[in-house]
Image: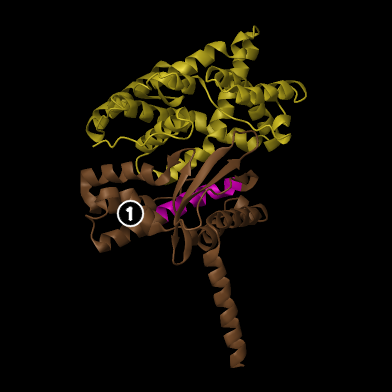
Chain colours: A yellow, B brown
Amino acid sequence: MNSFSRRIAWTLALACVLLAGCAGTPSRVDPFEPWNRAMYSVHEVVDGNVIKPIAQTYVKVTPEPVRTGVSNFYGNIDDLFTGINHVLQGKKERAGDDFGRVLLNSTFGMLGIFDLASEMGITKDKTDFGITFGKWGAPQGPYLFVPLFGPTTVRDGTGWIVRLYTGPIGYIDNVPLRNWLIALGYLDTRAQLLSAESVLDAAALDKYRYLRNAYLRARRYQVYDGKPPPEEEEE
Amino acid sequence: MIYRWVAILFAASLALSAQAQEAPDVMVKRVAEDVLQTIRSDKDLQAGNQAKVKQLIESKLAPNFDFTRMTALAMGKNWRSATPEQQKVLTDEFRTLLVRTYSGALSNYRDNTMDYAPLRSNPGDTEVIVRTSVRRPGQAPVQIDYSMAKTPDGWKAYDVIVAGVSLVTNYRDEFNDAIKSSGVDGLIKMLGDKNKGPTPK
């Protein structure tokens, strides 16, 4: 970021903090709401002007099979971590499926570009370190919105950092290749979020709040394996 | 001549009552497959032709939802403090909002396939949850459940739960906050403004 855009970002951030100070009532799950709302505004400006247009162009100019291949490649790495986390959560059978997928797709599926396993009926699943920590009893901690990354919590963010440091792409010695792979992975994720984002735009009266509540509920649902205890009413 | 009309009417009423007797999971499957098939066979729908998408939703999806109940649930305890007129306006606006939301999303569903879990319920039940999961190429399946209630017009959905997130509950937070800061009329105005805005792309 150059100094000019940095100054814009900070001015925006400050303006939003001041505005959000009145707009949002901090709650137990979101004690940093004014700060988070400011970060959300920063995100919308940077993402909306730079990242999102790139992602939209990527979707427009890249043929669908190529994009699916890219998604599958990164999805294969996700499967590996899903397997590791299923082991950590004590779900050995499910982990077996995950590792089976990785084995099959990494070899016959050409480094994961083809998702043969799904076609053979070994379904994809998804879990991560944040969920594992939650199952181990770690509290989620305050909600955080991180610009260019999205909604998270202290617990989930910690999980994400663990993943970042253990992911295979970080071990690639060829620096330009490594950086390209990281950038492409980011673009792939962003492109996949385009349709969900348009739903959020259409559905929410207050996008920040809608996203936060949906995120926290979805995570809670996963930590409790689809059987969450009833929510406490917050007044 | 008159006998033919009677026969047609009789056939029509039989068809209607057959529909009313249809089990909720059978109904969800029928509607979902019908809508997916329609999208897959229509290039305009895939391209996101808004008029056509809206027509599809109004003709095939919307009739299966109980929007009044959805609105009442999303309003929570505020529903009773609203006048009947406010309740009607709220229901209309909320319905419009949901239809608009679906209109934007539906054209992306072409590559989806759905799995239907067997229904766990007893014959006399008037409330059930129909569980489905949506598969998209290269992605983990997303669980989508429909809370449904038996009404005189057949089974109607009153909530959709996507990956554990209830549509109605998520709106309850939104509605609650809006009512706290600007009252029921404030919420009506917010919904109205949102619905008058441009359809997000």
Q: Is residue A51 left or right of residue A209?
A: right
Membership of A179 in magenta stretch: no
- Magenta stretch, overall SS: helix
Q: Is residue A5 left or right of residue B30?
A: left
Residue at 22 percent of width and 44 percent of height? B180
Residue at point 61%, 14% (across, down) = A169
Q: How many marks?
A: 1
- In the depicted view, which residue is nearer to us: A36 or A83? A83
Query: Residue B35's x, y, as percent?
Result: 60, 55
Which of the 4 image quarters holds residue A184?
Answer: top right
Residue B163 in the image: x percent, y percent?
49, 38
Q: Residue at label 1?
A: B72
Residue A13: image quadrant is top left
Dot 1 falls on which chain?
Answer: B
**Where residue A140 sits: x, y (%)?**
38, 22
Q: Quadrant of residue A210?
A: top left
Q: Amino acid at mark 1?
A: Ala
Element type where label 1 sits in the image: helix
Q: Determine if residue B39 is in view.
A: yes
B100 vs A181: above or below: below
Residue B82: % across, % down: 24, 56
Which of the two residues, B104 or B170, is positioned nearer the viewer here? B170
For the point 65% across and 55% down, which residue is it?
Answer: B37
Q: Quick check: A184 above or below B77?
A: above
| Side of B109 relative to A34 (left or right) | right
In the image, which residues are magenta?
B96-109
Q: Quadrant of the N terminus of chain B?
A: bottom right
Report whether residue A76 is seen.
Answer: no
Magenta stretch encompasses residue B102: yes
Q: Residue furthest right?
A: A108
Crowd class of label 1 (few under 14; some 14 to 19; many from 20; radius 10 Å):
many
